[in-house]
Image: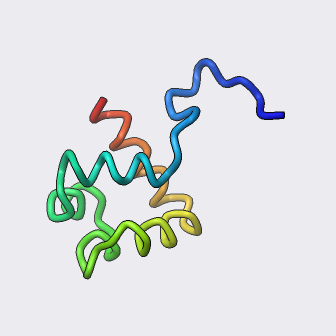
Amino acid sequence: MPLEQPNNPLHGLTLEAILTQLVAHFGWEELGKRVRINCFTENPSIKSSLKFLRKTPWARKKVETLFLEMK
């Protein structure tokens, strides 16, 4: 049973949903400037970016922080 997280602004959002919203808002080029990782600048795709972000905690944290700042 999932725990309730009323104080977590990311609760209920998937990483894919977060990334999709960031790309829609900024575009890949601007996203690559704001979060300096190759998967946003070299042949970017949702699939390759998700794969990288899921195994790289520091990069995921930067993406989540940017998402929260965007809101």
Which x, y percent locates residue 50?
47, 65
Which x, y percent locates residue 18?
41, 46
Which x, y percent locates residue 29?
15, 64
Would you place residue 65 above or below residue 59 in this image? above
Q: Quadrant of the C terminus?
A: top left
**15 on left or right of 6:** left
Front in this rendered view, residue 71 or 34: 71
The residue at the point 21 percent across, 63 percent down is 28
**4 on left or right of 25:** right
The residue at the point 50 percent across, 58 percent down is 58
Q: Residue furthest bottom?
A: 43
Query: What color scheme is it?
Result: rainbow
**53 on left or right of 18:** right
**25 on left or right of 58:** left
Q: Quadrant of the N terminus?
A: top right
The number of callouts visible is 0
The residue at the point 37 percent across, 34 percent down is 68
Q: Residue furthest top?
A: 6
Q: Determine which quarter of the picture holds residue 67.
A: top left
Would you place residue 45 above or below residue 69 in this image? below
Would you place residue 41 above or below residue 61 in this image? below
The residue at the point 51 percent across, 71 percent down is 51
Which x, y percent locates residue 60?
48, 56
